[in-house]
Image (cartoon, rainbow, N blue to C red):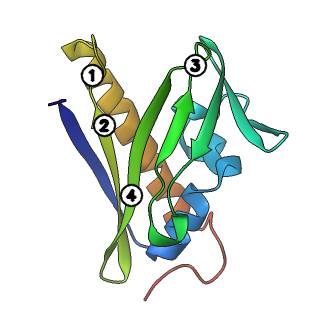
Amino acid sequence: MSEFRHLSVPIALSPRAVSAFAGNPANLPRWAAGLAAGIREERGRWLADSPLGAIEVRFVGDPSAGILDHEVVLPDGTTVLNQFRILADGPHSLAVFHLRRGEGVGDAEFDSDAAAVQADLETLRRLLEGGACVPGAHSG
């Protein structure tokens, strides 16, 4: 069984609003540092630049249900599934990212990956709570 960590952040907006913003690939440069570099849509595909070359980002979940799972296709064709959910917490949300340790990933790299994901989630929270999403999205 793989080792994993659940990284989360509460967000004082509705799950619908959080999912709409976070599930839009065009918004990734605003909050997801690991996927943000040079993101662009080309012929219906979302591509981003990485140290390894161009990667493709494909959302494969149901954003209306808060399932923002996405695949990252590396230049060598390897596909990595990132599980990301927006859960209801009363009128607010809890953004939860399931970080799985990849094969051959050491402790220091896994810790660094976790810190980077947590920082991205905190950036998402700050943006959304600061008014970066759709009008009327703030709850209560």
Three-letter code, disc 1 = Phe
Q: CA distance from mark 2 to mark 1?
A: 9 Å
Q: Residue at x 57, y 56 (%)?
A: 23
Three-letter code, disc 3 = Gly
Element carrying mark 3:
loop
Image quadrant of residue 17? bottom right
Where residue 99 is drawn, which disc sits there? 2
Q: Which mark is in front, 1 or 4? A: 4
Q: Residue at x 24, y 14 (%)?
A: 108
**Quadrant of the frame with the C terminus:** bottom left
Element carrying mark 2:
strand
Viewed as shown, does residue 55 lie left or right of 39?
left
Q: CA distance from mark 2 to mark 4?
A: 12 Å
Whether residue 18 appears in this view of the structure is yes
Residue 90: image location, x then y, percent: 30, 82
Q: Are marks 2 and 1 in contact (CB under 8 Å)?
A: yes
Q: Residue furthest left?
A: 1
**Quadrant of the frame with the N terminus:** top left
Viewed as shown, does residue 41 lie left or right of 126?
right
Where residue 110 is drawn, which disc sits there? 1
**How many residues crowd around disc 2 within 10 Å: few (fewer than 14), some, or many (20 or more)?**
some
Q: Which mark is in front, 3 or 2? A: 3
